[in-house]
Amino acid sequence: MSTRVRIALVMNVFLFWFSPALIRSDPNMVPLRTFKIRENVTYDCINIYKQPGLDHPLLKNHKIQMKPSVSRHELRNQTDNTKTYKNKMGCPDGTVPILRNSKEYITNAQLFAEKYFHPLSSESPGSHVAGVRSQNGPYHGVDASFSIHKLNIERDQASYAQLYVGSGLNHQINFIQAGWMINPSIFGDGGVWSYGFWKGENGNGCYNTACPGFVQVSQEVPIAQPLDQPKEDLLHYSIHQDKQTGNWWITKLIANAPNIDVGYWPKELFNLIGNGANMVGVGGAVQASHQGPSPPMGNGKFPIGDPKESAMFTNIEVLNSNYEQRRIDSFPMEKLLDSPKCYGINTDKIKLLGFAFNYGGAGGEFCGV
């Protein structure tokens, strides 16, 4: 089997991986301040040098990088969205927000993972994707704007919109993904949440700050938080590798406000993406319940007719091997769509927004396995 085929097979596993994990702050840490965003959603402001992400054994001698060596470009306001971003919280200097859990939250997430998901198998019943990717690396990042949508998702279903980077070799995979998700079994509600996920050396990794690894830097925007709709209806995320340190940053670019460098996954966590990733991509994804119908993707509408009527990704760009920003269609690119009866992707209708596409669908009973 060629290396290219192995990479493709391994990264297909990644695209179908929805294994949830838990998000916690150490109960032994005394927060300097707390923020209760809504019922059962509380953040503790933890000393940045004592945050749970630094407990990973590979980070024993890690020195926190407070900001990227090169800032991402300012967001060009190319949409009708002129809303000004306002922060919900602001931890005191020297602290960062870490999400606090309940016992019910932990129990539900564990049951969901054990009952429905198969992390290291390409056979993931009920998983479907619609998006684009390029496997012509090495790449040092990907960024895109994508619409946020509230959907009716059942307790044991999930719907995602994400961008990602990754590499695979000899049955090993490294990858990072970020975006928004609706997953009641993980978060305990049917709201839209931002999230990040990583998988590194020896198969280690998890969502958000569920296990050690992710280093939260922003005092105001945590890696996982409820997204306030309709006030916030668009995400512009960048996953990019720092040229000096090799750390993988996630930055939130915001119209009419400064960029927010949320945090990063340290280079030490990975053995295959230290010098760039072989693959980058963006798209939507869903996970059906064990015996029920497949949930809606995007905004639940098939991408036909007026592009404003369905979910979209716009301004999709990557950092190439020389850290130069280029449209993703400047490289060999493939569309991903495994259930055309239930979901669709259309790259032909959106203009003046860089490389873009509409995607999504209502799901249903006969979407395939």
Image: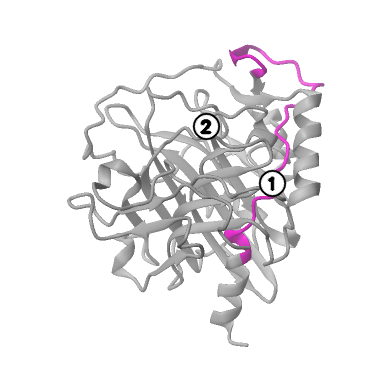
Mark in front: 1 vs 2: 2
Mark number displayed over residue 369: none
- Residue 345 at what x, y percent from top left? 37, 58
Q: Residue at x 53, y 26 (%)?
A: 226
Q: Secondary structure at mark 1?
A: strand
Mark number displayed over residue 206: 1
Closest to the observer: 292 or 27?
Answer: 292
Residue located beneath label 2 in the image: 192
Q: Main secondary structure of the magenta part?
A: loop
Q: Is residue 56 left or right of residue 99?
A: right
Number of numbered discs on residues: 2
Q: Secondary structure at mark 2?
A: loop
Q: Residue at x 53, y 55 (%)?
A: 246
Q: Which residues are magenta?
A: 13-41
Q: Is residue 253 left or right of residue 114?
A: left
Judge whether residue 304 is colored magenta: no
Three-letter amino acid code at the position of disc 2: Val
Whether residue 243 is visible here, answered yes or no, is no
